[in-house]
Amino acid sequence: MKMSKKRQFESIKRHSVVVMVVCLIVSAPARFQAATATTTQSLSASLSPIGKVSVPSSVSLSHVGTTFAAYTATLSVSYRVRTTPSGGGTITMQAGSDFTPAGGPLLSSGNLTYTCSGSTLGTGCSGTQTVSTTTATPVLTIPASSCTGGGGSCSGSDPNSVSVNLNLSDNTSYATGVYSTQVTFTISAT
């Protein structure tokens, strides 16, 4: 059945009115009150003891003074640390091998020693220490409840530092040449 043109027009007109009313309702501003909800969330962080140590990439021992005086250098060790109330920490050093090439100073003969001075947090090593390839030797002892920077109960320094004063004996049995070894510094914190 065909609709007459008049009926088609009236049907379109009714649909247009319905669409316009729906559009007006959808676009009309809301006259309702907004709902607001608030909630809280507890946050926690577990801060662990931690440490970081750094040294220059290399240091050269130099001879100053009388004939066969020791070769010396001062190495600045920088560190950041946080220890627990019942813990503490240490910094140690250990050589990876004897000096190379062969014919020079021998760590196994106790030719390289050091003292510690000027620590900004903790206590530097006591007396003269001998660098070893088999044992880590002390550089610094860090007390419980220590932390770097921030002032207050923490150290005011950031980073902290300690000086390692190296001393290499100059023995006539060493052949001339340039000798080197690698030393590893390790920090621990509990």
Image: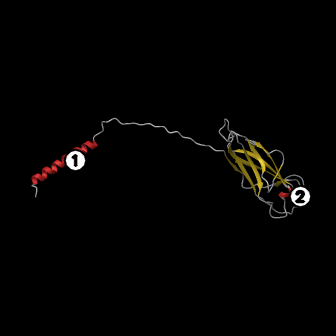
> x and y percent of residue 97 in the render?
78, 60
Image quadrant occupied by the N terminus: bottom left
Residue depicted at 25% across the width and 42% down the height: 25
Residue annotated with mark 2: 171
Select label 1 or label 2 by which is in front.
Answer: 1
Helix, strand or loop at mark 2: loop
Mark 1 and mark 2 lie on one chain; the one further toward the N terminus is 1
The chosen color scheme is secondary structure
Which label was assigned to residue 19?
A: 1
User: Left of 7 or right of it: where is 121?
Assistant: right
**Above-or-below relation of 35 to 71:** above
Front in this rendered view, residue 84 or 124: 84
Residue depicted at 22% across the width and 44% down the height: 21
User: Left of 154 or right of it: where is 181?
Assistant: right
Q: Residue furthest front?
A: 86
Q: CA distance from mark 1 to mark 2?
A: 104 Å
**Above-or-below relation of 122 to 130:** above
> x and y percent of residue 105 in the render?
84, 59
Tell me, yes or no, whether the two marked residues, 1 and 2, touch with CB atoms within 8 Å: no
Q: Check disc 1 and give the amino acid type.
A: Val
Categorize mark 2 by other alpha carbons within 10 Å: few (<14), some (14-19), many (20+): few
Could you tell me how many numbered marks the image carries?
2
Asked which quadrant contains residue 38, the reply is top left
Categorize mark 1 by other alpha carbons within 10 Å: few (<14), some (14-19), many (20+): few
> x and y percent of residue 141 in the render?
75, 44
Residue 118 seen in this snapshot: no
